[in-house]
Amino acid sequence: MNPSSPNSDSLRRLNALLPRLVDDQLSDEEAKELVAILQSSPEAQAHYLNYLQIHSELSAAWGVVDSVNPALLSEHFTTPDERPAASTIPSIPFAWTGTNAKLQGLVAFLVLVIGGLSLLLVMSLSGYLSGPVQQGVTPVTDKDDGASPLNVASVEDPNGPSNDAFTEGFVVAMAEPVAAVVVRSEGDFASQLSVGKRLTAGTLKLERGLVQMEFMSGAVVAIEGPAELQIHSKNAATLLSGRVSANVPPRARGFVLNSPKAAIVDLGTEFGVSVTPQGTSEVEVLSGEVELSLLGDDGNTLISQRVHEATRISVNQEKDLLQTITANPNELPKIVVFNDEAVPRTDEYAARIRRDSPLLYWRFEDGEDSPNTNNQVRNEMGPNHSAILRHGRNGRKDIQITNGYLRFQRSSSARYLASENAITGLNQGPYSIEFWMKPDDLQHATVLGVFPETRTDSRIFLNVFEIVTDTFMIHEPGALRFLHRTPPTASYETGTNAFTPGVCVPGQWHHVVAVKNTNAMEIYLNGRLARRVPLAEGKIDGPGDFHLIFGQLTAVADWRQFSGALDEIAVYSRALRPEEIERHFSAVFP
């Protein structure tokens, strides 16, 4: 049978079986039938993989998905550019949630019967790589002179020095996907492993020092030298020697960290792995639990054990045993989840902002406990346009002014900062929005939104500024997105996007300026133009009064919450000039 035609019987049958597969309703006979169809042609295999990936993405974004028809997905995308092409959808959904063991086993088997993907799955999940690995460094645009005292998110020179700590392997025609980004670096690595360095599949050999990286799936891993780590993808890595710690948030559940003869599948936890010079693996769970497997020579599980908090297990390869030993968490590298370093603001910085006459300037210098604040953030430029803190059910645990900046944590309820009154006529001409941000992670999150005062639908926006990682749009993972939609509407088919090149680096301060100009939208990052996108005639200016919201997508629900810090927010009723933006940034980082 050949399902190459959309009207073929086999493809119609495949579309009938796939919803039953993801709903765990396949009978044994139907499972055999599905395997036979997949073995029959490459077209059926590609259709199967695309279906599972789209189902996985939609399940993560929208909850349970009853059925997925790729031809009917356009209503879920913000602009026509967001509709996925089959060639751009990742081939293997490494992490599945909400399915039982039988379904997971069948999914894994069905992927394995697709011959061209079998080796990739084994490499990613069992940790055995017999040949050279792919190059592990993806260059970032621009150049960082290293002068930033806080090591503000570095931007690399694509023609700069290569990373000797990474093994370069075979050359591929297409750029490899980014697997992780360095968020903390302690050692004399120069630019090789500087903060902001993006890593693809490859082997990291660390003779000394410590490197903390965030995988694009959300898992955070700290490795301390001497150590060697093979990075397979955003969801999987193998420790060959040395010590690592891993912190895996809920969105990265299922992250796989292997070691020789062992596979550790996270079940929502923080854990550490050590590999001795003799090749013995030890796994210690600091919180939560993991599924630990001792692997046979064929890479399959011989013994499996659920390992719980405050437990350390040694993998005895000679006797094929998993043995409980004395826990010692102090031996493991320390993961820094958040640092409270503020932007090193100066009087000169504030003077330059005021001199350029913004409509509003929120500095967060007055704490919430200051007299007469009443959760209000005053406008440094006058009595109008103050901001109001809206706490969620957890109060100041979710949003607070601390150390001179605004701090957000994710919550199960809405919490945000919003303008107290609307800005009149903001979109009748050029305008600029300037702020400093330090994200906790790379989860898809809305930093700010600009919406009309008269909106009746929570989806109506003029602007959205977001960190984007797992979306159907085409962009680099961890990029910044500036959406402009004139006139403001709830229609997902309208609007223009500008994406930054490179990655927004967790734990580092970024100076951001979003500009709507006379004929284009621009994003400036750390004093430099990162992206400029033309705006079509009729999609630039418009009437209306507008509010600002910071920290989540809308005020009515906890959608796309931002976790991290914001500071020095300013809004201008004109387009800031490039030299003005550079002067603002250089007042903090000369």
Image (spheres, rainbow, N blue to C red):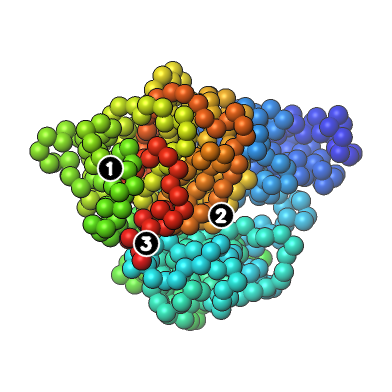
Which of the pair 119/476 is nearer the observer? 476
Look at the numbered disc 1 and give the secondary structure of its residue: strand
Q: Nearer the viewer, mark 2 or mark 1?
A: 1
x then y, percent, for residue 540: 55, 32
Q: Which mark sits nearer the N-terminus, 1 or 3?
A: 1
Crowd rating for badge 1 (residues with CA inside 10 Å; few <14, some 14–19, many 20+): many
Q: CA distance from mark 3 to mark 2?
A: 21 Å
Q: Amino acid at mark 1?
A: Trp
The amino acid pointed to by label 3 is Ser
**Could you tell which of marks 2 and 1 lies nearer the N-terminus?**
1
Residue visible at 51% across and 54% down?
529
Q: Which residue is mark 1?
A: 362
Residue at 47% x, 37% y is: 430
Q: On the image, numbered disc 2 is attached to which residue? A: 501
Amino acid marked by disc 2: Pro
x, y percent for residue 566: 33, 47
Residue at screen point 27% across, 52% down: 350
Look at the numbered discs 1 and 3 and tell me whether their residues touch, using CB distance below 8 Å.
no
Report the front residue among 92 and 492.
492
Height in image: 237 above or below 497? below
Badge nearest the viewer, 1 or 3: 3
Q: Which is more toward the observer, 281 or 234?
A: 234
Splitting the image into 4 quarters, where does residue 37 fall? top right
Q: How many neighbours does mark 3 have within 10 angstroms: few (below 14), some (14-19), or many (20 or more)?
A: some
Q: Classify 79 as above or below 236.
A: above
Is label 2 in a helix, a strand or a loop? loop
Image quadrant for the N terminus?
top right
Marks 2 and 1, how far apart at CA: 28 Å
Quarter of the image that includes the C terminus: bottom left
**Rendered image: mark on residue 586:** 3
